[in-house]
Amino acid sequence: MKSQAITAFGQPLEQVTSDTPAPQGAEVLLKVTHCGVCHSDVHIHDGHFDMGGGNKLDMTRGIRLPFTLGHEIEGEVVAVGPDSKAVKVGDRRVAFPWIGCGACAICARGDEHLCNAPRQLGVNVAGGYADHVLVPHEKYLLDYAGIPEGLAATYMCSGLTAFSALKKIDQPGPDDAILIVGVGGVGMMGVQFAKALFGKAPLVADISADRMAAAQKAGAGAAYDASDAKITRQIKADTGGGVFAAIDFVGSESSFALARNSLRKGGTAVVVGLFGGAFSMPIPMFPFTSMQLKGSFVGSLAETKEMLEMVKQGAVDPIPVAERPLDQASATLDDLRNGKITGRVVLRP
């Protein structure tokens, strides 16, 4: 099998050839047809996350090079282990990549994506920037019939991340506004799921006029220039005191400040993005404002199944998806790092 792999952190990916794995037990071998490129791939490729104040979270420990990125994986079953019963050769499936140890209390609750001993595809074990990928159990393979090829892969992170984040806020009332900060690939999914879950167009904020225009074309409401230092005043004026909830799909110091400062009293801010940084806030302001602050990391297997059913029923409009050959993986990471991608790019071996 051939992979586009990290051979040195921060350096261009290289093609690596290795033995194609043979599935054991309930393992399944997928021939990869599409694999999405995600901003978290950029951070792993860099080897760190920015924690603010000059501090960095080292991502190089525990990753043995060469390492294959890619967790938005779609493909065809080409081999199954002897214990596999639910899938067969020739089936087309997407892979839920957020796999835990399967034995701890967190996994028993159904929250494998939060496991402290993860086996996440493309994060902890080899992923989908390759022509084949080994999935550790057939239960992580989901039927995407009815969803266009290529687009289906993006729901395994981009879609799931947006869906799970929006599920973390209460049902808004008829006059409650929801703000989405950052309308890149995940934020564009957020626009669609907000419309489907709450029946209303969310407000959006971004530093890119092109992305804001694309979001409004996709059904978003008013759009705000996130680079304007006074924009939160305008948002509060337009919404009668602030938004009911703000979802930060960027996760930078400035984007989180915009999300937090746009809230009305009793509002909820959900932080999703991983761009990096830090913040401080006087503790009395939490009770004074009754603000809720939540973090959201991808989503559970149960949420994934719920989300896919919603998509299959036609409740969610597709986001822009562009295909590129697998050997453009490095260039695509650079484009994503430099903010040059609207929607999502999927690699095709």
Image (spheres, rainbow, N blue to C red):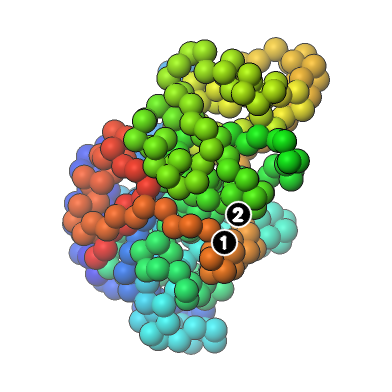
> Element at badge 2?
helix
Secondary structure beneath label 1: loop
Q: Amino acid at mark 2?
A: Ala
Cβ atoms at labels 1 and 2 below 8 Å apart: yes
Q: Which residue is mark 1?
A: 315
Near-viewer residue (273 or 97): 273
Image location of residue 53, percent across then percent down: 47, 16
- The structure residue drawn at horizontal position 29% and vertical position 55%, both measured from the top left corner, is 322
Q: Quadrant of residue 121?
A: bottom left
Which image quadrant: the C terminus?
A: bottom left
* Neighbourhood count class around disc 1 (C-alpha, 10 Å): few under 14, some 14–19, many 20 upward: some
Residue 300 rendering spot, x and y as whole percentages: 61, 57
Q: CA separation, marks 1 and 2?
A: 6 Å
Q: Residue at x 27, y 58 (%)?
A: 323
Number of other residues with Cα within 10 Å of mark 2, as a class: few under 14, some 14 to 19, many 20 or more:
some
- Give the quadrant of the N terminus: bottom left
What residue is shown at x 71% (from left), y 35% (from top)?
176
**Amino acid type at mark 1:** Ala
